[in-house]
C-alpha cells in the first residue's frame, strides 16, 4: 500500500470512529477562558465555545476569569466571539493565531469531529504521525488542501481506542491544554480529582463539568498555577486584531536578526 492510500485510510478511519453529538450538545459546558462552569454565553460562530460574559458572577470570580467582558447592550444580541468574527483562531498545539477564513488563505483548520479545535496543518500532522516524516508531509498537504481530519483528542493516548460513553471506564478524561484524552480506566493514577484529593494533593481533574460523564483534566505535561487553579491560560479572545498585529511585528523583527 502506498503512502497516499495509507493517509486516506488514516483520515477516513479516524473520522468514522467519532460519534457526532446532536447540535444542541455542540456548545461547551465550561468557559473557554477559565474552564469553570456556571452561567455562560455561547458563541454562535463556528467555534461553539462558551464564556463567562461578565466578571461579576460568582463562578468568574472564583476562577479568576478574565471573561468576555460584554456590555449590557452586547448581552441582548446573539454573541459571536472576536475569533469567529474576524476568522482568527488559535492553533491548539502552538497557540499561535491563524486565519480560519476558508475564502482566503486559510492557516488553521478545524478538526472534523466535534472538539472545536483548530490546528496548523504542520502542527497536527506531527501529532497524527509522530515517527514517519514522509507521512507527516503528506498529511500536512492534505489538511492544507481542505481534506477532513480528526485530531488526536478523539482516541485514548494509552490504548489508542475511541471513546464509548455507554461502557463504564471508557468515557474520556479530556485535557484542556492539549489534544490528549484518556479513557477513565487508562488515566494515570497521579492525576488527582477534586472529590478524592487530600489537603496536600494537586488537583488536576474534575467530574461533572462535561456532558456524557466525561472528566475535565490537565495532563501532567502542564504545570499548574496555584493562583489560577489551572495551568497558564494562553487563550486570546479579546483585542484579536491588535494581538495579531503585535505578533506579526514580533516575528518580523525577529527575522531581521536571524
Image (cartoon, rainbow, N blue to C red):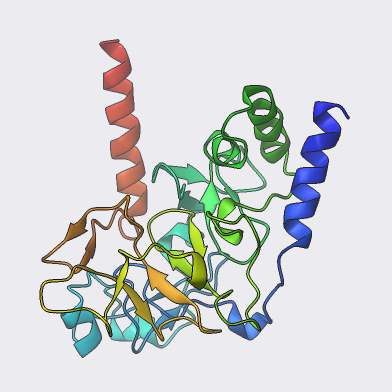
| Relative depth, front residue between 213 and 12 | 213
Position of 11 compared to 176: left or right? right
| Residue 193 image position (x, y, % from top left) | 31, 76
Seen in the picture, residue 103 relative to 75 is either above or below; the reply is above
Total count of labels: 0
Seen in the picture, residue 39 relative to 139 is either above or below; the reply is below
| Residue 12 image position (x, y, % from top left) | 80, 51
| Relative depth, front residue between 82 and 193 | 193
| Relative depth, front residue between 91 and 169 | 169
Instruction: Please state, as top left, top right, bottom left or bottom right, where the N terminus lies in the image.
Output: top right
Position of 61 compared to 38: left or right? left
Quadrant in which residue 168 is drawn: bottom right
Quadrant in which residue 75 is drawn: bottom left
Instruction: Please state, as top left, top right, bottom left or bottom right, where the C terminus lies in the image.
Output: top left
| Residue 13 image position (x, y, % from top left) | 78, 53
Residue 43 appears in the figure? yes
| Residue 76 image position (x, y, % from top left) | 41, 88
Q: Residue at x 75, y 47 (%)?
A: 11
Q: Residue at x 11, y 66 (%)?
A: 227
Residue 57 appears in the figure? no
Q: Residue at x 78, y 61 (%)?
A: 16
Q: Residue at x 23, y 56 (%)?
A: 232
Amino acid at each position: 500500500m502506498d503512502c497516499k492510500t495509507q493517509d486516506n485510510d488514516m483520515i477516513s478511519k479516524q473520522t468514522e470512529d467519532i460519534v457526532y453529538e446532536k447540535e444542541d450538545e455542540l456548545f461547551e459546558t465550561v468557559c473557554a477562558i477559565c474552564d469553570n462552569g456556571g452561567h455562560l454565553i455561547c458563541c454562535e460562530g463556528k467555534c461553539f465555545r462558551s464564556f463567562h460574559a461578565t466578571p461579576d458572577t460568582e463562578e468568574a470570580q472564583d476562577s479568576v476569569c478574565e471573561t468576555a467582558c460584554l456590555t449590557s447592550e452586547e448581552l441582548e444580541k446573539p454573541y459571536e466571539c472576536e475569533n469567529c468574527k474576524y476568522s482568527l483562531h488559535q492553533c491548539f498545539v502552538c497557540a499561535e493565531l491563524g486565519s480560519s477564513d476558508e475564502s482566503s488563505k486559510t492557516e488553521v483548520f478545524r478538526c472534523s469531529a466535534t472538539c472545536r479545535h483548530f490546528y496548523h496543518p504542520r502542527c497536527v500532522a506531527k501529532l497524527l504521525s509522530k515517527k514517519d516524516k514522509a507521512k507527516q508531509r503528506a498529511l500536512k498537504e492534505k489538511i492544507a488542501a481542505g481534506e477532513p481530519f480528526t485530531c488526536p483528542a478523539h482516541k485514548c493516548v494509552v490504548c489508542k481506542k475511541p471513546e464509548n460513553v455507554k461502557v463504564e471506564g471508557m468515557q474520556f478524561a479530556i485535557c484542556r491544554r492539549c489534544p490528549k484524552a484518556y479513557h477513565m480506566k487508562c488515566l494515570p493514577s497521579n492525576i488527582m480529582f477534586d472529590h478524592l484529593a487530600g489537603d496536600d494533593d494537586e488537583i488536576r481533574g474534575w467530574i461533572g463539568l462535561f456532558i456524557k460523564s466525561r472528566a475535565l483534566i490537565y495532563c501532567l505535561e502542564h504545570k499548574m498555577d496555584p493562583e489560577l487553579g489551572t495551568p497558564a491560560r494562553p487563550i486570546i479572545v479579546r483585542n484579536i486584531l491588535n494581538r495579531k498585529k503585535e505578533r506579526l511585528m514580533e516575528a518580523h523583527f525577529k527575522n531581521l536578526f536571524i
